[in-house]
Image (cartoon, helix red, strand yellow):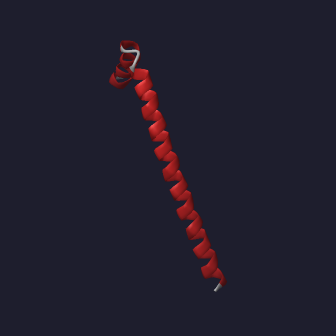
Amino acid sequence: MSEESGSAGQRVGCTGQPKGLLEQMEELMAALNADLSELADLQGGERDSVGEAGRG
């Protein structure tokens, strides 16, 4: 419960803070998208090598 009350206090306290939070969320989402893209590339590479191993 302390986390919920803390975040609610931050929203009410300062008008400049939500913009900072939004920027942080955008940065986190960009990092997450990059990580997911890298993971998809790695999984795609594993599938290719498994398929080639099965053929050989």
- Taking the view exactly as shown, the residue that stands out farthest to the right is 55
Residue at x 57% of width, y 68% of height: 45
Farthest-out residue, top: 12
Q: Tell me the residue at 63%/79% (across/down).
A: 52
Quarter of the image for residue 4 reads top left
Spot occupied by residue 20 in the image (x, y as percentages of width and height): 40, 27
The image quadrant that residue 14 belongs to is: top left
Q: In this rendered view, identify the residue nearer to me: 1 or 6.
A: 6
Q: Position of residue 23 (x, y in %)?
A: 45, 31
Closest to the observer, 15 or 5 = 15
Residue 24: x %, y % from top left: 42, 34
Residue at image coords 49%, 43%: 30
Q: Could you tell me residue 39's position as x and y percent?
A: 52, 58
Q: Left or right: 56 with respect to 20?
A: right
Relative to 9, residue 49 above or below: below
Decide: is 20 above or below 36.
above
Q: Nearer the viewer, residue 5 or 20?
A: 20
The N terminus, quarter of image:
top left
Q: Is residue 20 above or below residue 48?
A: above
**37 displayed left or right of 12:** right
- Asked if residue 31 is positioned above or below residue 55 in the image, the reply reads above
Quadrant for the C terminus in the image:
bottom right
Q: How many marks?
A: 0
